[in-house]
Image (cartoon, coloured by chain):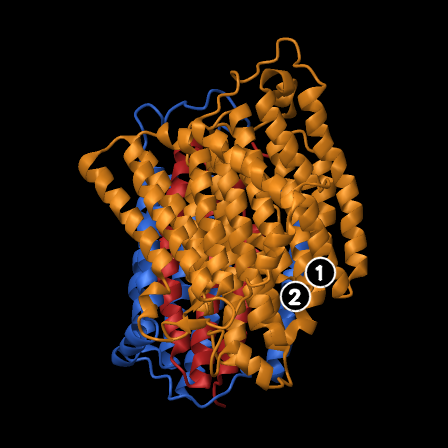
Chain colours: A blue, B red, C orange
């Protein structure tokens, strides 16, 4: 019963957040909507017995990642209204239609059976101990390989962020000029 | 009424579609990227819910790795967006029309 | 599955990661000259290649297995991917050497990212678990996003990088949701072994396969984005045109190799039991790619865009081999290996003609190249003829191989479409050749300074030309060898 109430409340919250993210004109509202979605998903993690993952979701995702997002939004500036005129008259509605069809198809398929794998494992209580021993035994290789990702994040950001002097302004040589000036 | 894993999986499917439609509808690089994050979260929710019904922790381990990947992706992605911004003062993808043909 | 193999099973990755860390540490500590980078990168890639060769000798055919609790596979497939990707990264670095050296201290990061991309590509081929595959995919893709925008002398490079990033992140998310649905449907993310996906699908009849099929479709879409198969190719032309000339070759070659390696293992080995579901979809993707790539290439006026659309068509040809399922994997490798070398060679010439850092390469730049730089023009001609599928080049042998595989699988209509597209494709390849030999530069047109070709680029072109001719004239030994490059 409690789970049902939680599902209804936070399910609506997650959807509202997602739609806000997609639809809000102001990127700050988008970010706040995304935060709401992330938090609601964290609640669902808890109700599915994934406590550790829920904590990571709140701390890393809703915390660190979203802070980074908001920071960049503030840096890039939010005051410019977005132009929503359609410049791909056919492809985009077509892709949207296919997407909605796909979503409906998945929901219909899911009504019959979502989970068709062999059930009856040893339980999925995601406490820190349980998940920790799983991560460091069975998943130790991918765990180590995430180090590569962190190297890329560091090296890539340095490579992208390292501006040589005088490069930031007017290094374009006038090539590819259209759209250069923001109205 | 008990909330089964199917409910969460259905919600995740809807979230996935909303996120993907954001990528198709919006032209702001930051908002598009946030839509991708919604899609990743939909996948994560599916992993956890399916793992619960299957009675295995694999789903939660997968979510853990997806979060690491997403964090690295956010760092690189925002670095690229900031680089573009420094040169053009816009985050709109439609203003990037130098390449066409 | 003796314990001693556990670290040897990921030895190529360890070698490359060690080279990357060494490179970055040496760079910040000693600030060495550029040749020191070359030594470290070369050592890492050579070690990776040698270890893959050892895996190939020792662990194909019967003596294969998965390691680290079913996370990584050591088999002919993975070993061959290493034997292809690591030398390709080496050639890509040689081709991009002038670009990397011109970037000042950032050059070390450039080289580190190429090495990491190579490691990611090999991981994608060797992964025996969807989560491993996802991590490999991201290691590979994130490196390439940064490489695509490496020069900031130009706006287009940023643009290429941003487009590549947004669509790539979207494709990754689609792929991941596919993994989640397959996990729900089969109860596992691991490919092989007891309770693995292949085992489960082979042993169980799923009465309600809707979720499984949706997951399968998403996996296919996500990977089709990575290999730029139509209609998921929209990023390729912009990225190839915008990325700095020196990088584009590696970008194009590596993305194809890594994407198809992952696709082939997932489809033929893991989802082999559901072949009836995915083979028609792959056939449609192949036909769409061949037709769309060829038709759009015809109207291009920029050689790099033209090569990008031609790469879409080639994705279609390679997919044609996969409709034959497991029997087509050897043919896929042949086409993939020879095409990767050709496309690297072609973009190396483009970088020489239009400049290492330049994005665009309009056809006007190529006018009269046959007189200005006869060797470059000859190399480009050979690459273009091979891509067009002229006999006595590797491109022809590859096309014959994939067409035969598709006919054996009963997909005659697909082969007819592909043959028609091959004929139509001759037109745009010949257009570039005509421009090089018959057109003369317009009066007063601002051509880039006379093509400068570094030693690295010369070596790349020599290797590409030799490989194209040798495997074009005598493809059988290689085709025979590649029969062993099957996934577990």
- Residue identifier under label 1: C405
> At which x and y percent is residue C163?
52, 43
In the image shown, does A85 or B40 lie closer to the viewer?
A: B40
Instruction: Classify residue C473 as left or right of residue C254.
Output: right
For the point 51% across and 16% down, the residue is: C449
How far apart in space, not on screen, are marks 1 and 2 (Cα)? Answer: 7 Å
Which x, y percent locates residue C298?
73, 36
Residue B41 seen in the figure: yes
Q: Is residue A144 above or below residue A8?
A: above
Q: Position of residue A172 (x, y in %)?
A: 45, 24
- Badge 1 density bin: few <14, some 14–19, many ≥20, Cα 10 Å: many
Q: Secondary structure at mark 2?
A: helix
Q: Count how many numbered circles sit on residues in the image.
A: 2
Q: Are marks 1 and 2 in contact (CB under 8 Å)?
A: yes
Q: Pick whichever of labels 1 and 2 is earlier in the sequence.
A: 2
**Residue nearest the viewer, comparing C422 with A61:** C422
Residue C345 quadrant = top right
The kind of secondary structure element at disc 1 is: helix
Q: Position of residue C300 (x, y in %)?
A: 68, 33
Q: Residue at x 34, y 61 (%)?
A: A145
Chain of the residue displaying label 1: C
Q: Chain of mark 2?
A: C
The answer to which image quadrant residue C307 occupies is top right
Residue shown at 55%/27% (left/top)?
Answer: A178
| Image mark for residue C352 | none
Provide the residue designation for mark 2: C327
Can residue A21 be spotted in the picture? no
Relative horizontal placement of residue A167, taking residue C399 as reference (left or right):
left
Q: Is B69 on the left-hand or right-hand side of A105?
A: left
Image quadrant holding the N terminus of chain C, namely bottom left
């Amino acid at each position: 019963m409690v789970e049902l109430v939680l599902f209804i409340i936070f399910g609506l919250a997650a959807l509202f957040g997602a739609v806000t993210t997609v639809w809000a004109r102001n990127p700050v509202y988008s970010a706040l909507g995304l935060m709401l979605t992330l938090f609601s998903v964290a609640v669902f993690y808890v109700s599915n017995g994934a406590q550790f993952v829920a904590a990571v979701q709140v701390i890393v995702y809703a915390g660190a990642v979203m802070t980074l997002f908001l920071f960049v939004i503030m840096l890039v500036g939010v005051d410019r209204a977005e132009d929503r005129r359609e410049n791909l008259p056919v492809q985009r509605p077509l892709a949207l239609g296919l997407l909605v069809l796909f979503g409906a198809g998945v929901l219909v398929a899911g009504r019959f059976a979502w989970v068709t794998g062999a059930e009856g494992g040893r339980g999925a209580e995601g406490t820190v101990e349980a998940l920790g021993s799983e991560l460091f035994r069975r998943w130790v290789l991918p765990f180590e390989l995430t180090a590569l990702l962190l190297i890329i994040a560091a090296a890539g950001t340095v490579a992208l962020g390292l501006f040589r002097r005088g490069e930031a302004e007017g290094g374009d040589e006038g090539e590819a000029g259209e759209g250069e000036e923001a109205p | 009424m008990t909330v089964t894993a199917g409910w969460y999986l259905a919600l995740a499917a809807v979230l996935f579609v909303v996120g993907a439609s954001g990528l198709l509808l919006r032209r702001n690089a930051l908002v598009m990227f946030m839509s991708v994050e919604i899609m990743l979260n939909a996948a994560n929710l599916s992993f956890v819910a399916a793992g619960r019904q299957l009675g295995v922790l694999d789903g939660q381990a997968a979510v853990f790795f997806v979060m690491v990947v997403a964090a690295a992706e956010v760092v690189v992605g925002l670095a690229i967006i900031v680089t573009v911004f420094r040169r053009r003062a816009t985050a709109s993808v439609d203003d990037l029309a130098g390449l066409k043909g | 599955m003796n314990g001693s193999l556990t670290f040897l099973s990921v030895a190529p990755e360890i070698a490359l990661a060690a080279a990357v860390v060494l490179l970055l540490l040496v760079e910040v500590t000693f600030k060495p000259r550029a040749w020191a980078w070359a030594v470290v990168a070369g050592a890492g890639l050579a070690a990776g290649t040698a270890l893959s060769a050892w895996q190939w000798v020792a662990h194909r055919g019967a003596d294969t297995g998965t390691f680290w609790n079913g996370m990584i596979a050591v088999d002919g497939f993975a070993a061959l991917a290493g034997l292809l990707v690591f030398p390709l990264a080496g050639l890509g670095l040689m081709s991009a050497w002038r670009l990397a050296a011109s970037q000042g201290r950032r050059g070390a990061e450039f080289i580190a990212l190429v090495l990491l991309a190579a490691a990611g590509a090999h991981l994608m081929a060797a992964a025996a678990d969807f989560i491993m595959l996802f991590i490999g995919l991201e290691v590979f893709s994130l490196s390439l996003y940064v490489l695509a925008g490496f020069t900031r002398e130009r706006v287009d490079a940023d643009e290429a990088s941003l487009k590549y990033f947004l669509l790539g992140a979207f494709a990754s998310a689609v792929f991941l949701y596919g993994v989640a649905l397959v996990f729900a449907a089969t109860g596992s993310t691991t490919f092989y072994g007891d309770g693995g996906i292949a085992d489960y699908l082979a042993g169980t009849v799923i009465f309600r396969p809707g979720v499984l099929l949706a997951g399968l479709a998403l996996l296919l879409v996500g990977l089709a984005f990575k290999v730029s198969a139509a209609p998921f190719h929209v990023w390729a032309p912009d990225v190839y045109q915008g990325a700095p000339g020196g990088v584009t070759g590696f970008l194009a070659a590596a993305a194809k190799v890594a994407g198809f390696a992952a696709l082939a293992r997932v489809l033929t080995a893991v989802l082999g039991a559901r072949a009836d579901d995915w083979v028609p979809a792959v056939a449609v993707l192949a036909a769409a790619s061949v037709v769309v790539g060829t038709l759009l290439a015809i109207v291009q006026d920029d050689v790099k865009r033209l090569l990008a659309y031609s790469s879409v068509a080639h994705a279609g040809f390679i997919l044609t081999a996969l409709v034959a399922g497991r029997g087509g994997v050897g043919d896929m490798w042949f086409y993939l290996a020879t095409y990767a070398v050709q496309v690297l060679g072609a973009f190396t010439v483009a970088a020489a003609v239009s400049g290492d850092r330049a994005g665009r390469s309009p056809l006007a730049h190529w006018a009269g190249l046959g007189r200005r730089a006869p060797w470059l023009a000859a190399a480009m001609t050979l690459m273009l003829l091979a891509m067009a599928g002229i006999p006595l080049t590797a491109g022809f042998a590859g096309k014959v191989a994939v067409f035969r595989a598709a006919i054996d699988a009963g997909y005659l209509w697909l082969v007819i479409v592909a043959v028609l597209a091959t004929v139509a494709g001759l037109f745009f390849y010949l257009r570039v050749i005509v421009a090089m030999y018959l057109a003369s530069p317009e009066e007063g047109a601002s051509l880039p300074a006379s093509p400068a070709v570094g030693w690295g680029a010369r070596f790349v072109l020599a290797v590409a030309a030799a490989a194209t001719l040798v495997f074009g004239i005598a493809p059988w030994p290689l085709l025979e060898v590649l029969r062993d490059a099957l996934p577990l």
